[in-house]
Every structure is written in C-alpha cells, then in structure tokens.
Amino acid sequence: MKDLSKKIKPLHDRVIIAEDTESKEKKTSSGIIIPVTVNEDKGSKRGVVVAVGAGRYEDGKLIPLSVKVGDTVLFQWGDKVKVGEEEYYIVRESEVLAIIK
C-alpha cells in the first residue's frame, strides 16, 4: 500500500480499507479464531484501514471515528474502487463490525 492520501481521501465518516486476501485462518492474541470463511463474500470481510475521514457531525459537533489507519477490521457492504493497481473498499464507519486486536 503506497501513500494513498495523495490520490484519494475519504469524507466524513467513511473509511478506506484494503481487503486482506491471504485467506488463512487467523487467531487473535486474545484467542479469537477468525475463520477462512470471513474472506468469502458470504458476509463480513477482513481488511486493514488505509485512510479515514474526519468524522460525522451530530448536533453541530464533530464526532471523530473510532477506527484509525493501520487497524485490522471486519467489515461489510463496501463500495469497491480501484486506485492505480490497488483495489480498496470505501465503507461508512457503521459498516465496520469489529476491530481485530
């Protein structure tokens, strides 16, 4: 993943995610096993956050996002975009299901 910020920047509560395509069962440090089926198009996908927007506004106040660049996440519903040779998903923060630690 090259410096994506010069090519595309998500707005508001959107997040850009590079999908993890290694397709190997993973185990988090806390012992949670993330199965291979997470990477199939049956539901959620696994990826790494490469860019985040500024946040969303509620009652005139800016609420920053909970995810940050470098977080590994489970997500769903994203719009797939191609930037150069790389493919990414653009999703709203509410479509990020979990941060994997």
Image (spheres, helix red, strand yellow):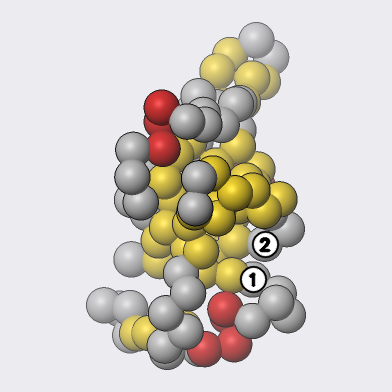
Q: What label does residue 44 carry, if any?
A: 1
At label 2, counting other C-alpha atoms closer than 10 Å, the crowd grade (few under 14, some 14-19, many 20 or more) is some
Q: Which circle's residue, 1 or 2, is located before the other in the chain? A: 1
Place of residue 55 in the rendered image (x, y in percent of width and height, measured from the top left): 55, 27
Tag 1's secondary structure? loop
Tell me the amino acid under the disc marked 2. Gln
Is residue 86 shown left or right of residue 57?
left
Q: Is residue 17 visible?
A: no
Look at mark 2 in the image and give the residue it sits on.
76
- Looking at the rendered structure, which numbered label has been put on residue 79? none
Q: Position of residue 56 (x, y in %)?
A: 61, 25
- Looking at the image, which is closer to me, 8 or 91? 8
51 w.r.t. 78: above or below = above
Instruction: Tell me if 31 is positioned left or right of 76 in this view.
Output: left
Q: Is residue 99 above or below residue 65?
A: below
Say which quadrant the C terminus sits in: bottom left
Residue under the image location 59 percent in, 70 percent down? 45
Residue shown at 59%/49% (left/top)?
Answer: 82
Mark 2 falls on what kind of element? Answer: loop
Residue type (three-letter) at the residue carrying disc 1: Ser
Residue at point 71% right, 50% down?
79
Give the camera-side residue of 21 and 91.
21
